[in-house]
Image (cartoon, coloured by chain):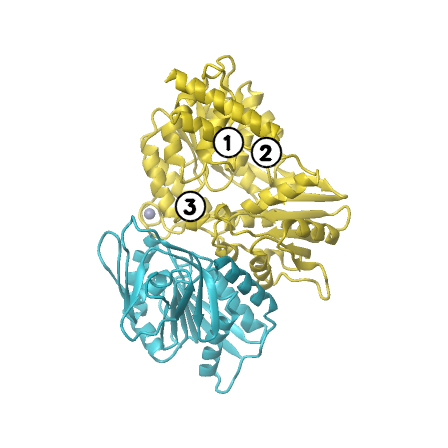
Chain colours: A cyan, B yellow
Amino acid sequence: MRLSLVHLYPALLNLYGDRGNIITLKQRCAWRGIELDVIEIGLGQDFPVSEPDLVFMGGDQDREQEIVIDDLRRRHGDRLRHSIQNGTPVLAVCGSYQLLQEYYKPAAGRELHGLGIIPAHTVHPGPGVPRCVGNIVIRWPLGTVVGFENHGGRTFLDAGVQPLGTVASGFGNNGDDGTEGARVHNLFGTYIHGSLLPKNPAFADLLLSLALARRYAGATLQPLDDTLERRAHDAAVSRAR
Amino acid sequence: MRLRRAAAVNAARLAAAVSRASGRGGTALPGLVATAMDPDIIAALASQLPVGSVIVAGTNGKTTTSRMLAAIVTSAGMKPVRNESGSNLARGLAASLVRRAGPTGNLARADRAVGLFETDEAALPAVIRSVRPRILVLLNLFRDQLDRYGEVATIAGLWKGALQELTGATIVANADDPLVAHLVQTTEAPHIFFGIQSAPESLSGLPHAADVKACPNCGAPIDFSVTFVGHLGHYICRTCGFSRPAPQVAAEDVRLNGVDGSLFAITDSDERISVALPLPGLYNVYNATAAAAAACALGIRLCEVRAGLENVTPAFGRMERLEIDGRHVYLALAKNPTGLNEVLRTIESVEQPLFLLPMLNDNIADGRDVSWIWDADVEMLRGRVASATFSGTRAADMALRFKYAGVTAPAGSALWSIEPDPEHALRSALSATPRGERLFVLPTYTALLQMRGVLTRCGLARPYWEE
Ligand SMILES: [Zn+2]
C-alpha cells in the first residue's frame, strides 16, 4: 500500500520540531509496510495534480507568515478547501492553524486575512500581554493529547465549531473558554507541538487510518508496540502538572 | 559614591569568602551582595580595566570563545577578567570584577587586565550599557530556548537596538551568519568580519535545522552555496544582492581530526598561521577564528595568537574528557538542534561503535519545550550505536527521537535503557561501555550541571567554580 502526504512550505513553516510529525507518520507507515510519499511544496510551487491522502502544515516565525499567506491563498486556497470538504485529513499546527481561520489581528499593523476554512479568528492582545507558553494536556475522544504550546494570539471559535478537545492543563485556544484547537471535517488545527505526533501515537494513527480508509476501502492499520511512546506521553503529562 | 562602592566591594568579598569556606562556591551570593549595595558597581569597575572589555555574544560558542581569547591574551601578557558562565549575568559580572578590586573599592591598577564577558543573547543591550566594551564579538544567532527568548528574528531586533548604544567600540562579527552580517552592516560602528573560507566537511545546501532561510535584507529566500555549521556558510540573495562580506580574518584548509581536534590556517591581511587546535569540530574552528579576530582588534599579532589557541583546554562540559573506571568519558553539552548536530557529527567520525548517554532536561534554563530534538539529525547515527542510556526529566522523549530516527538497539540487546536519574544513568552507561572505550555523555544545560554534581560527589571532577 502507498499513501501520499503534501507538506506545505516545509522550509518556511517549521518552527517547533514540526519535522517530528512527518517523521512519525512516515515511520508508522513504514513499520506497517505502507509507503508514505512526502511531497514538499514550497513558495511558488503548485499543488500536485493528484489528490493527496494527507496534508501537513507547520508553525512559523511571524515574518514568514506574511510571506506565506498570499502564496497560500493564490495557489492552494481552492484546492485545499475542496480537499478538506471531501474529507482529506489535514493537520495544521500553530501558525498554519491561524492561517486557515477567517482572520488574524496582530498586536500592531493590519489584519491578516486567512483562508477562512476554519470558522474562527485569532486576536493578539498586545505586546504587553504574556504569550501562552508551556506544557499542555487536553482531553479528546481518544484519551489525552500532550505537548507544548507557545503562541501570542488568542483564538476564538465561532458558535458550533467543534474544538479538538478540552484543556486539562495549559491555555489552549485562548486560555479562557477551555477549548483547544478545532476540527472541521478531517482538518485538525491545534496549538500543540512538542512534537505533537511522536508521543501521541493515537493521533498519528487516526490521521493515517482516515487516509487509508479513503484510499483502500476496508483497509485497517495493524497495531504497533507503543510502549516507549506511552512512556514519553506519560512523562510529558506528569511534567505538565 | 566612593564609600558606597568600597562598602559593596568589601561586603561582596566577605560573602565570597564565606561561600568558599562553606564549600558552596559559585558567584551568586557575592554578586548579589555587590549589586544590591551599589547598583552601578559593574559600570564603575569595568571602566577601570586598563585594556578595556570584550563582550562575547551569540547562541553557540560563547564560553569556548571566551576561554580561547583568555588563553590568547594570557600568552600576550595580559590578565583576563572573566565572568563564569551559568551564573546570573549581572551577578556573575559583578562578582568577577569585585574579586579584582581592593579594599578602597577600586581595581588594582598594576596589571594589564582585560575584561572578557560572555553574555546571553537577551541580556546584550543591558550589558553593553553597563560595561561599555572596547570590542563586541557577535558569534551567531541560532534557534535556542524559544520559549525563553522568543524567535531568532526577535533577538536580531533586540541586537539591532543594542548596537546603537555602542560608543567607540569595534565589532568582531561572523561574516558567515547572514543575520549577524546584515545587522553589523547596518550600523556605523567599525567592524572586523571573520569566517571560514574552505573546509572539506562542508555541506552543500542547508541542513534541516537551519534557522535562517530568508534574506535579512529583503525577505526573499537566500541561496547558500555551502554551509559549515547550521546556517553558517557562504550565501547570496539573488533578489537584492545582499551577500556574505569578505572576512578580514579567515580560517582555511581545515582538517578535522575526530574528537581530538583539528588543523587549519588563520589568515589576516598581513600574516598566516597554522593552528593545531586541541578542540574538535568545525564549530570550534569558528570559535577559534572569532577569538583570533578579537585578539587582532586588541592589537595582538596573529603570530602571538597561535600559542594561546594551541594551549586551550575544553570549557566545562564542551567535549571535556574524564577517565572513569578505565573508560574515556566525554561530556559534550548539546542544548539546541545545531549544537546537537555538531556534537553528533564529531562523535560519528569516531571509528568504533558508539556508547552514549543522552540527557534531556526541560527545566527553564534548558528551555521547557523539547521539540527541538526533532530538528536535529539523529538519523546520522543509524547502525553506529552499540549502547544508549537515556536520562533526564524527558529521557523518554529522547529515546523516542532515537527510535524514530531508526537508531535502535542491536537485536536482543539489553544495552538500551531509560534511567531518568543521572547517577543511576551514569552507572548503567558505564557498565554498558567496555573498558578502554569512549562513553559520550550528551546533556542539556541543567543535565550537565547535574552530571557534574554526580562526578564531583564521586570525587571524579572538580567543582566548576574552582576552574
Ligand atoms: Zn535580499
Residue under numbered circle 1: B29
Q: How many marks?
A: 3
Whether B398 is drawn above or below B443: the answer is below
Q: Considering only order in the chain, which callout, 3 or 2, is on the residue closer to the N terminus?
A: 2
Within-10-Å neighbours for mark 2: few <14, some 14–19, many 20+: few
Mark 1, mark 3: which one is toward the viewer?
1
Classify residue A114 by image quadrant.
bottom left
The earlier-in-sequence mark between 2 and 1 is 2
**Badge 1: how crowded within 10 Å, few (<14), some, or many (20+)?**
some
Disc on res. A211 = none
The residue sitting at 36% across, 77% down in the picture is: A185
Residue A88 to residue B38: above or below: below
Q: Amino acid at mark 1?
A: Leu
Q: Quadrant of the C terminus of chain B?
A: top right
- In the picture of the structure, the residue carrying the numbered disc 3 is B235
Residue lying furthest left: A110
Q: Secondary structure at mark 1?
A: helix
Residue plotted at (72% across, 63% down): B413
Type of amino acid under label 2: Arg
Question: Foreground residue, B22 or B5?
Answer: B22
Q: Chain of mark 2?
A: B
Say what secondary structure mark 2 lies in: loop
**Where is residue B232 shown, x and y percent of the image?**
47, 44
Disc 3 crowd rating (10 Å Cα; few below 14, some 14-19, many 20+) is: many
Q: For this view, does B447 lie left or right of residue B436? A: left
Report whether the residue tagged 2 is closer than 8 Å to ligand 1: no
Q: Position of residue A140 (x, y in %)?
A: 43, 72
The answer to whether residue B332 shows anywhere in this view is yes
Q: Residue under circle 2?
A: B24
